[in-house]
Image: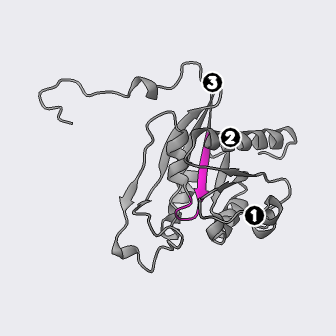
Amino acid sequence: MDFKGSDTIPGPRTEDHLPHTAQAAVKIVIVGGFGVGKTTMVGSVSEIRPLTTEETMTQAGIGVDDNFGSDTKTATTVAMDFGRISITDQLVLYLFGTPGQERFWFLWNGLFEGALGAVVLVDTRRLEVSFDVIGRLEERGVPFVVAVNTFPDGPRYPIADLRSALDLAPDIPIVECDARRRASSRDVLMTLMRFLHSLAMTGALT
């Protein structure tokens, strides 16, 4: 867009303005392995135009990034995704999607600063890429829920089997979702908020 000759620079769109009724904001991080749908989830549920830092994948990533099961993926997040959703008139969630490749995990330190909770997106075709992600959250003491993104060619497992495979505590919620659908992604976030509320009520949330 060419602004030459214009004395004004366009500001944010009306729909991007923070609702005047908002009284509280919560930072939520969406994590997971490479290609599990983090950018898709942020984009589908955000009420503002999401900020993405995707770059085209190149030959340089061969042998470095594990894209098994994501062979058709042509772009990848190199810093973060950002979106926003109003859960109620008073409560707003700021969503930060993390990069999936291990070589960018050093960015997690800043992204997790001030986060109240996290969503772990899981792809049943590649459960093993979730192990380190979950381990890092447990080390940091960040409460999280697990959302199983249902890919068309992904195998379906009973929740109990997934809990066992991921070595999750009995109280950690596991839900299925379609990250492409706004309603489904919103349900995941609501599950996280209910989990955080239950932790707060028992004094387990610090």
Q: Residue at x 67, y 66 (%)?
A: 155
Q: Tell me the kind of residue under disc 1.
A: Tyr
Calculate the distance from the C-alpha at mark 3 to the C-alpha at mark 2.
Answer: 22 Å
Q: Main secondary structure of the magenta part?
A: strand
- Above-or-below relation of 16 to 73: above
Query: Where is mark 2, residue-wise?
Result: 187
The span shown in magenta is: 27-36
Question: Is residue 113 at least partly visible in the picture?
Answer: no
Q: Tell me the kind of residue under disc 3.
A: Gln
- Above-or-below relation of 137 to 131: above
Asked which quadrant contains residue 33, the reply is bottom right
- Above-or-below relation of 68 to 94: below
Q: Residue at x 42, y 49 (%)?
A: 52
Q: Nearer the viewer, residue 183 or 118?
A: 183
On the rendered image, what quadrant is the N terminus found in? top left
Horizontal placement of 67 versus 129: left or right? Answer: left
Q: Residue at x 55, y 58 (%)?
A: 108
Residue 191, magenta (yes or no): no
Q: Which mark is residue 23?
A: 3
Query: Where is mark 1, residue-wise?
Result: 157
Please report whichever mark, 2 or 1, sits nearer to the chain's N-terminal start. 1
